[in-house]
Amino acid sequence: MVFNALCVVLTQEYFVFVPDVGVTGRLLVRGPYIVPMKKDSASITIHDIASELGLHASTVSRALNDNPAVSKKTRALIQAKAKAMNYRPNRMAAALRKGRSDLLGVIVPAIDRHFFASVIRGIEEEADKAGLHVMFCQSYDDSDRERKLIEGLQRLRVDGILLSVAKDGGNEPDFYQSIIDSGTPVHFFDNAPRGFDAAAVVIDDRRGAYLATKHLVNQGVSAIAHLRGPQHLDIYRDRFKGYQDALLEAGMAVREEFIVDITSHFDNGRKAFAALWSRDAKPTGIFSASDYSAAGVMQAAQEQGLKIPRDLAVIGFANEPFTDLMTPTLSSVDQQTLSMGRKSTRRMIAHLKGDDSDNQRIILEPSVIERGSSRLKQ
Amino acid sequence: MVFNALCVVLTQEYFVFVPDVGVTGRLLVRGPYIVPMKKDSASITIHDIASELGLHASTVSRALNDNPAVSKKTRALIQAKAKAMNYRPNRMAAALRKGRSDLLGVIVPAIDRHFFASVIRGIEEEADKAGLHVMFCQSYDDSDRERKLIEGLQRLRVDGILLSVAKDGGNEPDFYQSIIDSGTPVHFFDNAPRGFDAAAVVIDDRRGAYLATKHLVNQGVSAIAHLRGPQHLDIYRDRFKGYQDALLEAGMAVREEFIVDITSHFDNGRKAFAALWSRDAKPTGIFSASDYSAAGVMQAAQEQGLKIPRDLAVIGFANEPFTDLMTPTLSSVDQQTLSMGRKSTRRMIAHLKGDDSDNQRIILEPSVIERGSSRLKQ
DNA sequence: TTGTAAGCGTTATCAT
DNA sequence: ATGATAACGCTTACAA
């Protein structure tokens, strides 16, 4: 019992009637007295509830956890009392005792990319269902920060980590393996390391790029450029491969002067346009590995007086919501983000329940979203 | 000590040499023996480190917390050992004992709105500096969910909660007051309840709206419509007031037919344009309380063949990054998001350190970002 | 059905 | 400078 208030009563005379005894009389009260204040709900424990009810803390614990061993009556009594006292179970204490925090750690490069916000939504849905809480962190694509975040989550004793690897590519597969070996389950999504068997849910980037490029081919575009992401990352290498697949299938050459290296930013799209238009051969279509860069290209092209899609058809990758706000709207590739989050989380939950056998790579199917920036026919 | 591996050795003969004693001989080993496996780093405790070093756990604790009472030598020894053993302090246990989790709870409507993602970045910066960890949650503007999240954070024993109130406005000021009374410090940002004294960092919405509308006036726009946010929310009432302030100052009437009620969505912008253009009087400028709706208006207007800003000048509110990607780029009002996050967090930290006197409303100054959608004069 | 007691991994207050 | 010990709030095996 904690005392946080001092009630000073020096001397006070009360006129009292005690009903149970039927006695009336005078009562002289002297002080000071220390009187317990109403406790903060954060400091109310099962012991407080127990003592109010003349029970033991263990019974209260059982009742609040719906343990069938406790009688219906006392359970109802206890639960009502807990509610009345505004009791908040201390999850730290429970976690410490149970050796399980019911916390899931999630690390993404940045939460304000719609792609990740949407995956997170999928994760949240499944975690909520399972009664897990989720701790989101941003690596800002910085692998040093990613390592620190992982260690922080381990200190918090999260039950598992869902990770989309930082795109600076600074952490080796060995590092991730060592985390898993240290006893923290790690499942990957989106950008997953290769080189060892780990549970992962990824998109088929090669096929997504193939479909996007093929879409341009189908629209009758014959000179297709590619804004290519950093080639030290698997996902961007795969997108480049898919681009080549579609060109080769259509009998078109992969032309060096039609490839511009970018990172996923708006300004890089503008620069890419400038680079392409400084060369002799001009493309009539662009497949960009990034929506942001595609948006930059569109803006720069329009400033040059080009009509999109007539003079230049554009398609991006990731289906960010702003693609729908542009003029014309920007075609893109959808990555089944919600599904990615849900699937990842469901597998992690299965893993935590003891099924740690599933360390396959699940590969989701992307789909092209056709919008104004690439619609030439029909 | 936990044993998680069984090493079965039935009978095995070893030829051994014991250097310290200088004895050579035969050793007959019988089994089975239970052999401790290398422990998961999550299960290594200060007791393990202590016993490896022949010290006591309390000394290890002191050393790892840089308590000056422990000698330089042993401290270095202990810290090296902890590193070698890949020790991860159990924050749950520390929090339980210290009565302080070093966790900050943050609730925002949605993390994929750039406004909130940016405030969060500011929060993260300051929290990192102070060694606090942050738990982000999304209310999706649902006040039921907001209540559940708050309770969840209380169970986690976060030291304080930073809250941007859900925009469905379902929770009364009394509710928030009761949370604070229950002992959990709550500071508000962005959308803060009125009716009681609570620490809050908000933007001067009225002034932001005034500046935006005045900007249109200065560009020579004479018929200015307003896409008006839900009037049960202070922030949108204020933006409406600022709009009126600027009109009155310019000697313009506030015309009923130029006001359309929206919620902050792209489609509502499109609908608003349709509504405005179905009426007799057509505006030549629009101040929208939301960037998303402003984007919708722009798109719908352009589809009708209107030239922006020539036929219709547009300015939004919030300065979402997509405003820079549009054609033309969309003017908006910046809300000092980073600053909002930083200031909020710094005050909460001061509060947690014992200074709970500061429950003022801090009001930040907004600024107009002029872009293509409203630039009529040079 | 309920009570008792031990223990989860720390930190803080004593001793030594 | 270090060790012993209790306590934080909970769960759970065991006892009654």
Image: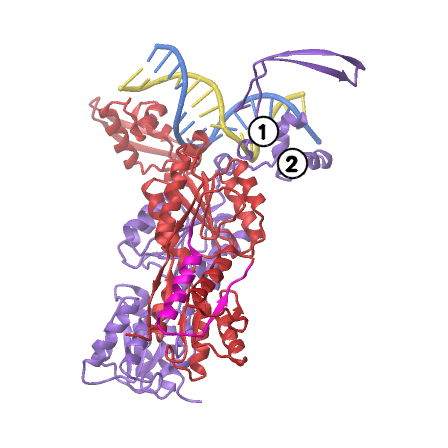
Chain colours: A purple, B red, C blue, D yellow
Q: Mark 2, residues whose alpha carbon is within 10 Å: few (<14), some, or many (≥20)?
A: few
Label 1 to label 2, Cα distance in Å? Answer: 13 Å
Q: Circle 2 sits in a helix, a strand or a loop, which is it?
A: helix
Please say if A104 is above or below C8.
below
The amino acid type, in three-letter code, at marker 2 is Ala
Residue A106: % across, % down: 41, 52
Chain part drawn in magenta: B202-231
The amino acid type, in three-letter code, at marker 1 is Lys
- Chain letter of disc 1? A
The residue lying toward the viewer, choosing from A110 and B378, is B378
* Residue under the point 56% across and 14% down: A32
The verdict on residue A40 being magenta is no
Q: Which mark is residue A84?
A: 2
Residue A111: % across, % down: 39, 57
The residue lying toward the viewer, choosing from A228 and B319, is B319
Residue B163: % across, % down: 47, 48
Give residue B354's quadrant in the image.
top left
Could you tell which of marks 1 and 2 lies nearer the N-terminus?
1
Please say if B133 is above or below B298.
above
The verdict on residue B204 being magenta is yes
Depth check, mark 1 against mark 2: the one in front is 1
- Chain letter of disc 2? A
The residue lying toward the viewer, choosing from B214 and B121, is B214
Q: Circle 1 sits in a helix, a strand or a loop, which is it?
A: loop
Residue that extends furthest to the front in the rendered view of this protein: B251
Q: Mark 1, residues whose alpha carbon is within 10 Å: few (<14), some, or many (≥20)?
A: few
Q: Is residue A143 visible?
A: yes
Residue at which label 1 appears? A38
Quarter of the C terminus of chain B within the rendering:
bottom left
